[in-house]
Image: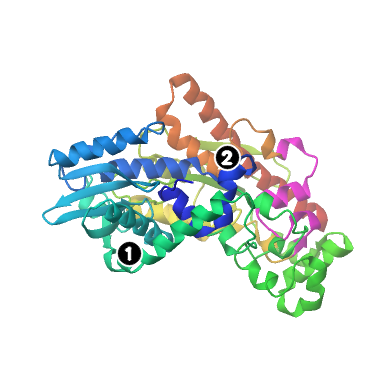
Amino acid sequence: MNLSKSRYTRGVQCARMLWLGEHCPELFDCSVMNEAVLATGNEVGDLAMGYFGDFVEVPFNRNDMTSMLAKTQEYLEAGEKVICEASFSFDGNFCSVDILRVVDDGVEIIEVKSSTSVKDIYFHDVAYQYWVLSNCGLKVTGAYLMHINNQYVRNGELVLQELFTVEDLTTIVLEMQDQVGQNISRFKQLADSSAEPVISIGPQCFYPYPCGFHGHCWQHVPRPNVFDLGGVGGINGFKLFDAGYITFTDLLDNLDSLNKKQRVQVHTELMDLPPTIDCDAIANFLESLDFPLYFLDFETFQLAIPAFDGLRPFQQIPSQYSLHILETADSVLEHREFLAREGTDPRRPLAEKLCRDIPENACALAYNMGFEKGVIKQLASCFPDLAGHLMSIHHNMRDLMLPFSKGYYYSREMCGSFSIKYVLPALFPNDPELNYQNLDGIHNGDEAMSAFVALGRLGAGEAEIVRAQLLAYCRLDTLAMVRIWEKLNEVCA
């Protein structure tokens, strides 16, 4: 088996993952591949090439790696000082260096990442490159990681030296060289074997990257299991799993370690209990709301490279909202919405329309309101002339998630979650109007974010189709909130 940077780091995460990728690629679940993240990485990598000034780039050729090796050698012999995607191979171990700097006494490796910090797996990535280049006979004098500085605020033209942070990993990478050689030998031996490695499931199934072979490696774990327990999550579930608790039945011997909502989930599941409904608590919540009611939901997008002045990398930028309005309990439901034009800074027009659509001191509802309140507070800080109105909306917001997050209403179908994507089908299992899967094109927030970012690359006709899909998705978010509010009223009637 030949190794590359990605294959090597895959082996570091889990050698079984590496083996499955070689021998059983058909088992891989492509849904773990976040295309938006990959696109961001490519965009950041392309921009970073200019960090050190003029550069040359080795063209990528998946079908002919030898041409990349030859082009790299040609650039080195020509005396080029900055070579991007410089490619090297030693004993079947290939790597392309994001940025190779030729200095007086050797070369420097600069690995570029679109993250905002240094992660452990990056040390392995850079250490592998150092090992390959050193064995190719190059004197590597430094190994660095270039990543996004999330404190940078754009003001005019991008300043690459402020947008990126460069961290020196040389000392740590040098200390890892023996480990790299040992890993390469072990990975190749495992990969060349016809027998699947016996490696138990563990945190490596989730970290540092989600594994596409989860369905294969976890097929022996019964459902529901401790990882389905509300509030546990993937890595944290192993504290229970490693202690011998796997199924909900196992947890009956360890109920004292669970919180109240988790105990309700376990009992509801095992005994197939009807929904738990605290009518008094729900009624108190409903009585705290004042008409007219404004059901609000934002959609946002993030850019690693800030496109507009005043923005930081990966800052949440609101691009649209949906607003359903009930003047009274018996009034006709009204709907308003906003969707920004692609390529423009959406913050000011969105904030102005929001102030027109929601009066001061009105009772606005959101589902998991922390997100909406954060967006509004950020807009208020950007536009002081609108801050009073915006913060009035912020201060008067109520959270429709509260009856579920507090455990006032719980049913087995919620699977321990109070996310609207679980609560809605639990409350309305057979309502096609409230089924996100019945929408065209966009079914969740990640898809909405990716779709909006991609609008500028579409033709006019296709863009209008996607815009309609975005509006339909966001509209369903607030319609769902209205229907949930109605259901809460119904169970307390």
- Work out whether 334 lies above or below 403: above
- The one of 210 and 313 positioned closer to us in this rendering: 210
Q: For the residue carrying disc 2, how many other residues have a C-alpha within 10 Å: few (<14), some (14-19), or many (20+)?
A: many
Dot 1: element? helix
Residue 376, given in percent of the width and then of the height, sits at: 45, 53
- The one of 361 and 69 positioned closer to us in this rendering: 69
Residue 482, given in percent of the width and then of the height, sits at: 68, 46
Residue at 68% over, 50% down: 216
- What colouring method underlies this structural image? rainbow
Determine if residue 314 is in view.
yes
**In the rendering, which numbered label is found on residue 173?**
1
Find residue 334 and report its image quarter. Answer: top right
Residue at 59% over, 55% down: 16
**From which residue to which does the magenta span run?**
408-434
| 64 in the magenta segment | no
In front: label 2 or label 1: 1
Q: Amino acid at mark 1?
A: Val
- The one of 371 and 394 positioned closer to us in this rendering: 371
Distance from disc 2 to disc 1, alpha carbons, whole Å, reads: 47 Å
Q: For the residue carrying disc 1, how many other residues have a C-alpha within 10 Å: few (<14), some (14-19), or many (20+)?
A: many
- Work out whether 432 lies above or below 126: above
Q: Is residue 416 left or right of residue 112?
A: right
| 432 in the magenta segment | yes
Q: Is residue 29 left or right of residue 342?
A: right
Residue 473, given in percent of the width and then of the height, sits at: 59, 37
Q: Which residue is mark 2?
A: 474
**Of all residues shown, which one is farthest toward the bottom?**
256
Residue 205, given in percent of the width and then of the height, sits at: 59, 58
